[in-house]
Amino acid sequence: MTRQTTITQRGNAVEVRGLVKHFGEVKAVDGVDLDVREGTVLGVLGPNGAGKTTLVRCLSTLLVPDAGRAVVAGFDVVRQPRALRRKIGLTGQYASVDEKLSGWENLYMIGRLLDLSRKDARRRADELLERFSLTEAAKRPSAKYSGGMRRRLDLAASMIGRPAVLYLDEPTTGLDPRTRNEVWEEVRRMVADGVTVLLTTQYMEEAEQLADELTVIDRGRVIAEGRVDALKAKVGGRTLQIRPTVPAELDRMVGALAQAGLDGIAGATADHTEGVVNVPIVSDEQLTAVVGLLGQRGFALAGISTHLPSLDEVFLALTGQKTSTAAQEPEQDATDAGDKSLAEVSA
Amino acid sequence: MTAATVTVPAVKPGADEGRIGLRANLRHIGALVRRNALQIKQDPQSMMDVLLMPVIFILLFVYVFGGAIAGKGNQHGYIQYLVPGMMAMMGMNIAMAVGTGVNEDFRKGVMDRFRTLPIARSSVLIAKIVVEIGRMLIAIAILLGMGFLLGLEIKGGILALLGAVALATAFGVALMWIFILLGLSVQTPQAVQGMAMLVLMPLQFGSSIFAPTRTMPGWLEGFTEVNPLSNLADAARALLNGQGAVAHPALITLGWTVAITAVTMPLAVAKFRKKT
């Protein structure tokens, strides 16, 4: 990847060029370029160990990169860390609040550390607790909060200084689906307020829900980037799974779909073991069209569901390779198979 | 990948960084002191060492060992001997908590939060030290109160008493840097305590805190003469009882205080910066 760039500090809230961070032999971040336009959400998608957290820690002044440049909100992360800290908020995978302190005391303390007056710090703490629906729990030690409450408190803590750029490092990892939706809702509200967000995630669905653009990284390098819908089209969008009430109708359903020649729909396949028909789709209109058609033809349906491609499928589609973590095992299998055949030969 | 060519307006390192003003720094330390104090409020058991150690130790030594050390029926004389020495010991044992506190902070995400805020990193440490000094003074007050109940007399006057408290506190703060360094160097709070005990036990008992050094073998007596705790105990004893040389042991204690601070503070601060 060759790119000649000028960091203009106009339009982009985050600009990263050739960022490198190695830990001994481990090339955690190995030459990353990325931009986040002001007021948008960039999703950084990658498997465990891809370098997402190291990247965020470099951009939030927690780590000093070995090489490359990064300018965030107009400030150089290495040369102007203190000025930059007034412009950023960080919510990591692990709660970064004092668990022995109550929610209110945590927010008040951070307000004071951000140089708010006592009165303003008090007001801001009340305001944010209200906004993140934590007013009732304000006086309780945050150690007693549920996972979702603690994540919300963490988000509130990141918002005290009204940051221009917010880093969310796997904000919903380890949360149940309902809590995850709550966190997503909060993130959308923050974006609506004009905050620029850099979000790391392992889930395609999360990226699709929140991000405008996507950067896919693996082993510390960018392997794909672009608008979410463009990447989705590349990956093949969703799979619509239809379960007929009468399993014997699987093939007739596939035939009916093929004959109808619906716009953009090709390659419906019958999965006899699961008893479902799989239809690749890229839009909600296609979903409606397929279900509508099957209804018209009088098929009885027991269930329909859509599935997003998993991270492994995304990687496979974008790079023709499995993720670095997923790649380990098949190789192992191949060696085993090789050994076996060798053993057979010698026998 | 070839390196990206980057054109940027020249930025001087730290151009608009400046130092954090004194008032802002004090405000930050104040907010962090409040945090540490609230932690104690939330977890009152963490004050056990401060509240109970002076009581238990003074009762134990006066009534169990006092007769044997100072002669039967001479417990009163032993109190005059023991309490100033224990002031030295209190500071030392209380200071240990700062090491476990620093260690715990680093094991939690909250340190990341502090490090992404525009505050001087040292303010986190300074706040801890301020709170520990407060705990130390409470422990010394309880010790003295207990001593008065058992008949302690301050023969040297109030100023001498304050001098002894100040000396014990100064030495305690110097020790805190050792414990902070330790807290930053080992993995768990338990390890901090274990390592600290290894240092504390010989220093405490190889000293003149509990018994006069006359009966000790020569090599140990030599050790106690340079042991800062002995000197601190001797200085405090002379101050409280209004008799004996003050200047010599006080100077040795201050010498140790300065030396320990000069060596361990920069190391601890460097380690803290590196970790943060």
Image (cartoon, coloured by chain):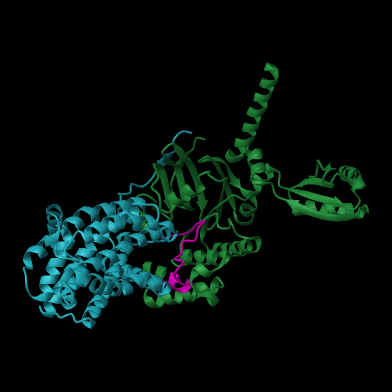
Residue A243 forms part of the magenta stretch: no
Residue furthest front as drawn? B72
Q: In the shown orientation, is residue B243 left or right of residue A31?
A: left
The residue under the point 11% across, 65% down is B250
Chain ID, cyan in image = B
The residue under the point 44% across, 51% down is A57
Q: Position of residue B84 (x, y in %)?
A: 17, 71
Q: Position of residue B112 (x, y in %)?
A: 42, 57
* Above or below, comparing residue A326 to residue B172 in the picture: above
The residue under the point 22% across, 69% down is B86
Q: In the shown orientation, is residue B21 left or right of residue A259?
A: left
Q: Nearer the viewer, residue B38 or A283?
A: B38
Residue A95 forms part of the magenta stretch: yes
Q: In the shown orientation, is residue B58 left or right of residue A112?
A: left
Identify the magenta region: A86-108
Q: Position of residue A41 (x, y in %)?
A: 56, 55
The residue under the point 48% across, 65% down is A159
Q: Nearer the viewer, residue B32 or B120?
A: B32
Q: Residue B116: tell me if it is visible.
A: no
* Above or below, comparing residue B118 to residue A257 in the picture: below
Residue furthest top as drawn? A346
Q: Nearer the viewer, residue A235 or B31?
A: B31
Name the quadrant containing residue A192. bottom right
Q: Position of residue A183 (x, y in %)?
A: 59, 63
Q: Residue B153: tell me if it is visible.
A: yes
Chain ID, green in image = A
Q: How many marks?
A: 0
* Above or below, comparing residue B230 to residue B77 in the picture: above
* Above or below, comparing residue A324 to residue B12 in the picture: above
